[in-house]
Amino acid sequence: MKGTLVTVLGAAALARAGSITTSEPAVAAIDAAMATTLPEASSSDVKGVAFNRFYQVWLENVDYDLAAKDSNMQWLASQGILLTNYYGTTHPSEPNYCAAAGGDNFGMDNDNFHQIPANVSTVADLLDTKSISWAEYQEAMPYPGFQGYNYSNQVTYADDYVRKHNPLVLYESITNNDTRARQIKNFTQFDSDLANKKLPQWAFITPNMTNDAHDTNITFGAKWERSWISTLLKNSYFMDNTLVLLTFDEDDTYPKGNRVFSVLLGGVIPDNLKGTKDDTFYTHYSSIASVSANWGLPSLGRWDCGANLFEIVANKTGYANYDVDTTNLRMNETYPGPLSIGEYSKFSPIWPIPNTDAKCSAGHGVLDIVKKTYANTTPTYNYTSPYPWDSKANYNTKVTATRMSKSTNTTSSGATGSTTPANAGVAGVVPSSAIAIGSLVALFAYIF
Ligand SMILES: *[C@@H]1O[C@H](CO)[C@@H](O)[C@H](O)[C@H]1NC(C)=O
Ligand SMILES: *[C@@H]1O[C@H](CO)[C@@H](O)[C@H](O)[C@H]1NC(C)=O
Ligand SMILES: *[C@@H]1O[C@H](CO)[C@@H](O)[C@H](O)[C@H]1NC(C)=O
Ligand SMILES: *[C@@H]1O[C@H](CO)[C@@H](O)[C@H](O)[C@H]1NC(C)=O
Ligand SMILES: *[C@@H]1O[C@H](CO)[C@@H](O)[C@H](O)[C@H]1NC(C)=O
Ligand SMILES: *[C@@H]1O[C@H](CO)[C@@H](O)[C@H](O)[C@H]1NC(C)=O
Ligand SMILES: *[C@@H]1O[C@H](CO)[C@@H](O)[C@H](O)[C@H]1NC(C)=O
Ligand SMILES: *[C@@H]1O[C@H](CO)[C@@H](O)[C@H](O)[C@H]1NC(C)=O
Ligand SMILES: *[C@@H]1O[C@H](CO)[C@@H](O)[C@H](O)[C@H]1NC(C)=O
Ligand SMILES: *[C@@H]1O[C@H](CO)[C@@H](O)[C@H](O)[C@H]1NC(C)=O
């Protein structure tokens, strides 16, 4: 099905991602597949420590301060907890979506057509270890599992669905499996899964290029988001035991450093925390880490390994997050990798090796297939860090982090809701002074 619809690029092209271009499948072929490709819907009810369902909705390209001024964004924050210290991983869009699924952006610094090799695992593999149902809902995607570069409005040809905003479709570990690919669906199927009470426990929601503010602005996007979520807030089938993350892929003014306005809401947020703020440092990797800790799942052994957990999960698991000093943090660029074209990072042909034996933030170790695939190798980076860094590329080497004391929820800070870390006196993270185990591997990796 898929191979005939998209000009699939050979392995040789993957060696130099920068040269990848793609031809669009013919509209007639898309129409034919639309008529015959059935969506895959599975539901499950695996209990987690903090939530039984986790959905994230991503808008596009808005600076934190501009989002904070929007009245609909303010309303959304009033319904939940505002995360004031949450970061995208780099620029432009696609590497951020990629990161939210695979725990790394692989040096990607572009919005090109990418296919990440099947030996790279994703959050879907973690969820599958406990048969926790998952799906994506991509507005205006023509049919389940569509792999084309875009599907535009067929009347105006304005941008509508775009592959670069679709995390799981980038991974061959998803697209090589027809059942998995058909769990990537559109908003029509969200409506029917909701009506049929067949919603999955994990989902990634991407509005089209109009609604997500990409081709409009924050006024439009926030209004859309408020109207979308406010109906659901009243739906107990959807909201009971549910955590929803509303965030942005990246900010708009690159030198500002990529902090994005993010809100956690849903049935699991206690009333006394609605309208409060949480200043804990988070990144897109935190959503994978929090999902793992919530359901007791292993880690991908990549940047999800050391990522801070959403407080609602950290509190329930007794996990101590890191307080990260963001003064020298640069989340607006990234380290070298195989998906770079030399824009905000450098090209390196080597796929980064994950950590296979760390405990990782959830404390449940690393996924078995990752351990098997990368047995007897040395991790490329120090993935136990709460923020990405790379000594060889001198990337984020001046950032420091300190473990907070374990959360004790007896002395709730109440209405302020902010986490002022009490440093536990545990040795701080000072990567610049440490000789990373990964350095030698990294050295090798950067031979062009
Ligand atoms: C994973 O796949 C890529 C692309 O085929 C390959 O270059 C790499 O060597 C593989 N890694 C391992 C550990 O098998
Ligand atoms: C969603 O996908 C179905 C095919 O599964 C298609 O018939 C429908 O037109 C799509 N809806 C939208 C709004 O793109
Ligand atoms: C994808 O976008 C291009 C450029 O805007 C457009 O010409 C093409 O028709 C689109 N393809 C589909 C399948 O919508
Ligand atoms: C995006 O979706 C909305 C419906 O949610 C629709 O009104 C709008 O026309 C779509 N944008 C494009 C460019 O097709
Ligand atoms: C494809 O994915 C489904 C659902 O995750 C799984 O049950 C099945 O074993 C996979 N098939 C192969 C060949 O990996
Ligand atoms: C967004 O665009 C609309 C329509 O052009 C405009 O009225 C509004 O002021 C814009 N919002 C911002 C924050 O610029
Ligand atoms: C990232 O931010 C730093 C600090 O503001 C700035 O010097 C640098 O140019 C930015 N990089 C990009 C790619 O915007
Ligand atoms: C406090 O933590 C315990 C477990 O550590 C948990 O059962 C309880 O629900 C938490 N209370 C609040 C108010 O978060
Ligand atoms: C790796 O990161 C962790 C957490 O940031 C830190 O405690 C450790 O010292 C680092 N290890 C190396 C070798 O840099
Ligand atoms: C987590 O525990 C801290 C410390 O007691 C408390 O201030 C905060 O409100 C709790 N957060 C959540 C989301 O439960």
Image: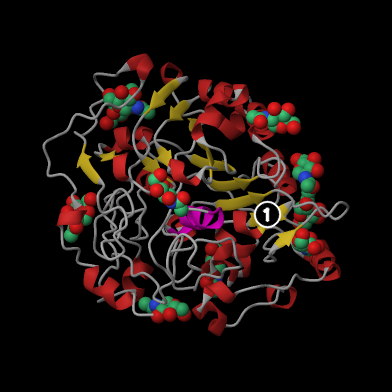
Q: Position of residue 442 (x, y in %)?
A: 29, 71
- The location of residue 360, given as percent across then percent down, is 28, 53
Tally of numbered discs: 1
Q: Is residue 378 magenta?
A: no
Main SS, magenta region, reads helix
Whether residue 392 is visible here, answered yes or no, is: yes
| Above or below 243: residue 119 | below
Q: Is residue 180 left or right of residue 385?
A: right
Q: Classify 350 as above or below 425.
A: below
Q: Give the range drawn in magenta.
A: 92-102
- Which residue corresponds to mark 1? 185
Q: Residue at x 47, y 39 (%)?
A: 52
Which residue occupies the foreground of this view, 383 or 31?
383
Question: Which residue in the rendered view is the most extreme toward the right?
Answer: 155
On screen, residue 48 versus residue 437, left or right, reads right
Within 10 Å of disc 1 (Cα), the crowding (few <14, some 14-19, many 20+) is many
Q: Is residue 155 above or below residue 416?
A: below
Quarter for ligand 3? bottom right
| Residue 101 lies in the magenta-colored region | yes
Q: Which amino acid does label 1 sit on?
A: Lys
Between residue 37 and residue 276, name the one nearer to us: 276
Quadrant where the C terminus lies? Answer: bottom left
Left or right of 351 on screen, residue 325 = left
Q: Which residue shows up at 26% across the image and 26% down it?
A: 420
- Report whether 24 appears left or right of 297: right
Query: Where in the figure is residue 172, as x and y percent of width and height?
Result: 54, 70
In this view, the residue in front, 417 or 430, is 430
Residue drawn at the location 67% of the way across and 63% of the way down: 145
- Residue 409, position in %: x, y? 27, 24
Whether ligand 2 has any atom under 8 Å from the Cβ at mark 1 is answered as yes
Residue 288 seen in the figure: no
Q: In which quarter of the image is residue 8?
A: bottom right
